[in-house]
């Protein structure tokens, strides 16, 4: 198994899946040199989305965020690359697509702060927690 520091967790969010952008986003991920260690299409229940985003429980956008994330299927992924957390955040771009740099996924595929196409872990520690929320050890190839 790779060093934990080389792994991050990502989601292709319901807006991007619904818009038919899953394939294009995976192509960007491949072109950027990530190795996919695990990937699956899931449809979260509201309770599963609330558990995943529990750190944001007190935020005003929490109900909207969890409703949206449980509204339709999304793709969850464990991604490997040197400095994976930073590399994936760089490829995603700023949370607000309007502020994201050209060439980033949120710039190309995001519509708003909530419907911003992709999610990524913000630290190695959270990457490990988030990967294990969706994948068992046996699902990491
Ligand atoms: P994500 O990386 O999935 O982590 C939390 C999400 O909350 C974030 O991306 C945004 O899509 C969403 N969100 C919605 N509204 C806000 C907001 N006002 N500030 C920050 N994040 C927001």
Image (cartoon, rainbow, N blue to C red):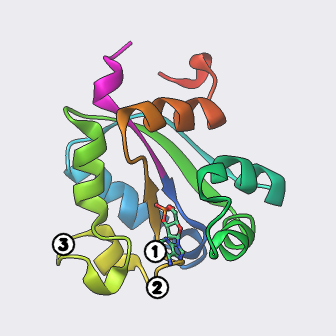
Numbered range of the magenta stretch: 1-10
Instruction: Examine the image and state in which quarter residue 132 appears.
Output: top right
Q: Give the left or right position of residue 84, taking residue 53 as reference.
A: left
Image coords of residue 120 (percent x, y): 42, 52
The earlier-in-sequence mark between 3 and 1 is 3
Q: Quick one: SS at disc 1?
A: loop
Image coords of residue 125 (percent x, y): 43, 31
Q: Nearer the viewer, residue 16 or 128?
A: 128
Residue 32, magenta (yes or no): no
The earlier-in-sequence mark between 3 and 2 is 3
Give the label on residue 53, or none: none
Residue at 28%, 28% in the rendered image: 6
Q: Give the left or right position of residue 1, taking residue 45 as reference.
A: left
Q: Nearer the viewer, residue 18 or 120?
A: 120
Residue at 38%, 55% in the rendered image: 26
Mark 1 and mark 3 in contact (Cβ < 8 Å)? no
Q: Give the left or right position of residue 24, taking residue 73 as reference.
A: left
What residue is disc 3 on?
103
Q: Is residue 49 visible?
A: yes
CA gap between label 3 and label 2 equals: 17 Å
Q: Mark 3, mark 1: which one is toward the viewer? A: 1
Q: Mark 3, mark 2: which one is toward the viewer? A: 2
Q: Nearer the viewer, residue 94 or 73?
A: 94
Dot 3 crowding, Cα within 10 Å, few <14, some 14–19, many 20+: few
Is disc 3's CB within 8 Å of ligand 1? no
Q: Quick one: SS at disc 2?
A: loop
Mark 1 and mark 2 in contact (Cβ < 8 Å)? yes
Image coords of residue 113 (percent x, y): 46, 80
What residue is disc 1 on?
116
Instruction: Examine the image and state in which quarter residue 81 appears.
Output: top left
């Amino acid at each position: 198994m790779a060093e934990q520091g080389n792994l991050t967790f990502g989601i292709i969010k319901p807006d991007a899946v619904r818009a038919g952008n899953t394939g294009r986003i995976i192509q960007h991920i491949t072109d950027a040199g990530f190795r996919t260690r695990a990937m699956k299409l899931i449809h979260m229940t509201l309770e599963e989305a609330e558990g995943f985003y529990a750190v944001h429980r007190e935020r005003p956008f929490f109900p909207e965020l969890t409703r949206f994330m449980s509204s339709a299927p999304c793709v969850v992924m464990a991604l490997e690359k040197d400095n994976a957390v930073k590399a994936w955040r760089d490829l995603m771009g700023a949370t607000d697509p309007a502020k994201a740099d050209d060439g980033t996924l949120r710039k190309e595929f995001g519509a708003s702060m909530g419907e911003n196409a992709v999610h990524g872990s913000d630290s190695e520690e959270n990457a490990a927690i988030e990967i294990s929320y969706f994948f068992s050890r046996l699902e990491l190839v």
